[in-house]
Structures are given as C-alpha cells and as structure tokens.
C-alpha cells in the first residue's frame, strides 16, 4: 500500500470512530422526530458509515404500524 | 480593522513558528503593517525565530495584568513594518484567559493590517484561546502521515468555529521525493483535508538551520513569499518544489541529496 492509500485509510477510520454517545443521541432524536408522524414499533436503527471520499452516509430505519394525521400549521 | 489569522497545526514540530515569522516578514516586505503574537504561552519561541530574543521588557501577560501599556509590550523588527508581542515565558498557559486574549486582539485590531497568532501545538486550551480570537486559520502540516492526520483533526475542530476561511500550508516538502513519488503530494493532502492550499514550502536547510528570515533568499522564503501574496490577492500561486529535480541535472541533484 502506498503512502496516500495508507493516509486515506487512517483518516477514514478516524472519521468512522464516532464520539461516545453520538449514535445513541442521534437515534433518540430521530425516534422523537419520527414518532410525531408514525406509530413506531420498537427502536429505530441508525447506521453511520464513511465512504472512500470521507462523506458520511447515514441510514435510519424504523418500523411503524400506523401514521398520525398531519397537523395544520395553525393548529 | 485588521485581518486576524491563527497559524496552527495540531502536531508540534511542523514549522508553525518559523512559518509565522517568515509570513510576517513576507507581508511586511510588501508594506503590510503586521503584528505577530506568540500564542504559545509558557513555551514561546517566536521572538527567537525573529532574532528578537531578550529585547522585550514587557510581554503579553504584563499587558493583561495592567503592568504596562500595550505599546510597551510591542517591539518593532528593525527595517520592517513588522511588530511582535512576545508572550510570557514565566507564566503558565492557563493564566491567560480566553476572554482577555480576545479583548486584547480586538483592541490591537485597529492598528495593524494583519495580526498573525502563532498557536501552540495541540488542541487544548491554548488552541481554543488562539482560534477563538481569530477570523482566519492557516493549518501547517508536513507531508507525513502523522502530521496530516493531526491536521485533519484540527480542521475538523476549526470547522466548528466561526472562521471566515481555513487554508493549508504544506511545509518541508522534498522535491526529490515528490519526483520519485515517494512522498505525499501537497495537492492530494489538500483534497483529503478539503481545504485549499495557501502554500507549498520546500524542505530547506537554510530555514532548518534556524536562520533569521528576511536576511536572504532561499527556496523556502520564496515559497512563503508566494503564500503571503496569496493571502493578499487570493492568486493561488504555489511553489513547485520539483523544479530543481527535473531533467538530467535534476536527477543528479536528486541522487546527491539521497546520498547526502
């Protein structure tokens, strides 16, 4: 592996290492937001990944068995 | 109002203080009224890099303690519109509060075109103090994996501050290794860190030997002068460290350098 590839790998692995509690906080916020629209079944699943360009890819998956009616802005 | 620029790196020993001193000389050489502030409280060496050691009667800590006027703690480098406010060697970094430092920089802002702050190594209190008083940041790194990794950490932290701009200087670039593809390309480093290059500074024995800048011509000083020009005009001119190592003569130079 040349120097550049090694550096890229190190930087990506540094970025992929999320701060302590980060994923839990993100899951909590995502669930709070989603539960205003959906009747959630269990916990949401959060996956944070980093691609080869250093871009974060965030996937949030959740299951729901119903939706809540939309509130109008003046309600 | 002046432009306040922090020169930082994360990793120690990459040439921050030397770059600060040389940029100061380069800006002043273009007639820009420049103040250099040693933000490395307790481990200050900017005065040494400028050849101004032991000339200060007062320092930054004295100003903050009200022991002297601001003007008494500022020294002019002879022959240049270049000034330095040394920091205290005898006090601990924690004794200089971030708010006081920021107020001092704000007070000085009206008197200079550029204020360059030499940031301490690391990402602790001294880093925060220097960055929070600045509008722009220059991150200095060398083309070594450990230095670039620390620079990446620093630019991530800097992106959380309200800065107007962040740019990179890659220092100690060896043209012979670049030609042979044995070192990281500065442009690749810039691409990975996602910030533009302000300068590429070649490895230069004259600078490494601790020569006081402003006193001669060298490839490193020429490269830093280009970086100073980029600060003023935004031209984006970069020094090419490989020029000396191209062609037959370049190959001979490269071999001699390797065997040296």
Image (tube, rainbow, N blue to C red):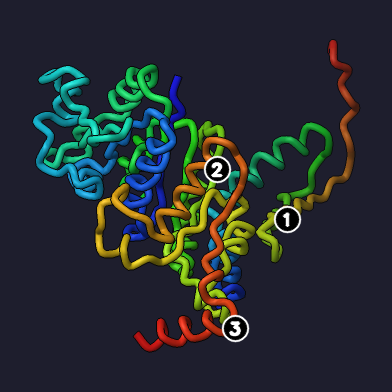
Q: Determine which of the numbered discs, if any, sits on residue B230 in the image.
A: 2
* Label 2 in the same subunit as label 1: no
Side (left or right) of A74 relative to B234: right
Q: Quadrant of residue A47?
A: bottom right
Residue for badge 3 = A1
Q: Secondary structure at mark 3?
A: loop
Q: Quadrant of residue B88?
A: top left
**Chain ID, mark 3:** A
**Residue A16 visible:** no
Q: Dot 1: within a 10 Å radius of its alpha carbon, few (fewer than 14), some, or many (20 or more) residues?
A: few
Place of residue B200 in the rendered image (x, y in percent of width and height, measured from the top left): 51, 58
Please identify the quadrant where the N terminus of chain A is shown: bottom right
**Residue B160 visible:** yes
User: Compared with residue B255, is residue B143 higher up or lower down, i.e. above or below?
Assistant: above
**Chain ID, mark 2:** B
Q: Secondary structure at mark 2?
A: helix
Please identify the quadrant where the C terminus of chain A is shown: top right
């Amino acid at each position: 592996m040349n120097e550049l590839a090694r550096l890229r790998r190190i930087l990506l692995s540094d970025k992929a290492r999320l701060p302590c509690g980060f994923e839990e906080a993100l899951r909590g916020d995502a669930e709070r937001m989603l539960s205003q629209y959906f009747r959630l079944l269990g916990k949401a699943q959060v996956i944070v990944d980093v691609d080869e360009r250093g871009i974060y890819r965030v996937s949030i998956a959740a299951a729901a068995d119903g939706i809540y009616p939309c509130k109008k802005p003046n309600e | 109002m002046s432009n306040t620029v922090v020169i930082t790196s994360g990793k120690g020993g990459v040439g921050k203080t030397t770059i600060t001193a040389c940029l100061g000389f380069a800006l002043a050489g273009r007639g820009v009224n420049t103040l250099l502030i040693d933000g490395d409280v307790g481990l200050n060496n900017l005065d040494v890099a400028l050849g101004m050691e032991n000339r200060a009667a007062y320092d930054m800590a004295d100003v903050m303690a009200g022991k002297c006027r601001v003007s008494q703690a500022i020294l002019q480098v002879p022959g240049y519109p270049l000034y330095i406010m040394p920091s205290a060697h005898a006090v601990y970094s924690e004794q200089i509060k971030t708010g006081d430092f920021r107020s001092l920089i704000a007070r000085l802002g009206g008197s200079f075109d550029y204020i360059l702050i030499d940031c301490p190594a690391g990402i602790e209190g001294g880093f925060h103090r220097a960055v929070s008083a600045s509008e722009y940041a220059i991150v200095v790194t060398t083309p070594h994996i450990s230095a670039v990794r620390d620079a990446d950490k620093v630019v991530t932290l800097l992106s959380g501050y309200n800065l107007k701009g962040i740019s990179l200087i890659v220092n100690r670039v060896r043209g012979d290794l670049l030609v042979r593809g044995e070192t990281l390309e500065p442009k690749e480093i810039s691409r990975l860190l996602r910030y533009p290059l302000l300068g590429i500074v070649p490895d230069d024995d004259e600078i490494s030997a601790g020569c006081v800048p402003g006193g001669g011509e060298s490839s490193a000083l020429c490269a830093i002068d280009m970086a100073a020009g980029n600060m003023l005009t935004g031209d984006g001119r970069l020094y090419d460290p490989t020029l000396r190592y191209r062609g037959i003569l370049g190959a001979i130079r490269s071999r001699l350098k390797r065997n040296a």
